[in-house]
Image (cartoon, helix red, strand yellow):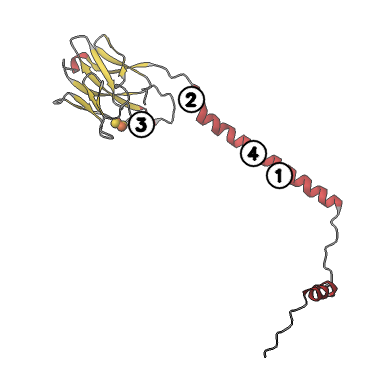
Amino acid sequence: MSETKPEPDTQAGERVAETAPESPSHEAPAPDPQVLARRRFLARASIGLGAVGGVALGAPLVGFVVAPLGRAVPRTFRTVGKVGDFEVGQTVEVKFIDTSPLPWAGVTANTGAWLRRVDEKKFVAFAINCAHLGCPVRWLPDARLFMCPCHGGVYYEDGSVAAGPPPHALSQYVVRVQGDEVQIRAEPIPME
Ligand code: FES
């Protein structure tokens, strides 16, 4: 017959723990109330100064980004060539500077259009940017179509959508002839 060991008396154990001698206390002395008040003041002052610094740095940055959004974009006519530079019936790419007045625009201020001389006096200019997501479209003279290489958008020669995801026709610029100069009115092009 095997003897069963008696279960440890947990209550007794707890009693032992309760009655165990306490280790010597190493509690720090209570801090001086003046020191505590000074620390609180310094903490609040540093938080306040941090907030003021954050606003001082952040406000110009926010203004730098947001201000151009509310600024009216001027519409300016840009000369893209002489009337005699263009043959009747031909569609060619022309370059010009857009109306962005932002000094940091750099080369991104350059844009282009597909200009067609319809007859002796009439010109039409199509946006070079696809109406879907803005990829530059190419003019295929043999097919007489505009093609977008990004997602296969296709436009007829009048700029209307022939196939693909473009939600609307190619945008057109206003074109005028001033003297012997052909001018395009530069303005933002609506995308999808
Ligand atoms: Fe032209 Fe998508 S950007 S089809």
The answer to whether mark 3 and mark 4 are in CB contact below 8 A is no
Q: Which corner quadrant of the image does residue 118 belong to?
A: top left
What residue is rendered at 83% in x and 73% in y?
15
Tag 2: Cα neighbours inside 10 Å, few (<14), some, or many (≥20)?
A: few
Q: Nearer the viewer, mark 2 or mark 3?
A: 2
100 with respect to 181 (left or right): right
Under circle 1, the secondary element is helix
Tag 3: Cα neighbours inside 10 Å, few (<14), some, or many (≥20)?
A: few
The answer to whether mark 1 and mark 2 are in CB contact below 8 A is no
Of the 4 image quadrants, the one containing the C terminus is top left
Residue designated by label 1 = 46
The answer to whether 111 is drawn above or below residue 79 in the figure is below
Amino acid bearing label 4: Gly
Under circle 2, the secondary element is helix
Q: Which corner quadrant of the image does residue 184 belong to?
A: top left
Residue designated by label 3 = 107
Residue designated by label 2 = 69
Residue 183: percent from left, percent from top: 29, 15
Tell me which label, 2 or 3, sits earlier in the chain. Answer: 2
Mark 2 → mark 3, Cα distance in angstroms: 20 Å
Mark 3 → mark 1, Cα distance in angstroms: 44 Å
Residue 53 - label: 4
Mark 3 → mark 4, Cα distance in angstroms: 35 Å
Tag 1: Cα neighbours inside 10 Å, few (<14), some, or many (≥20)?
A: few
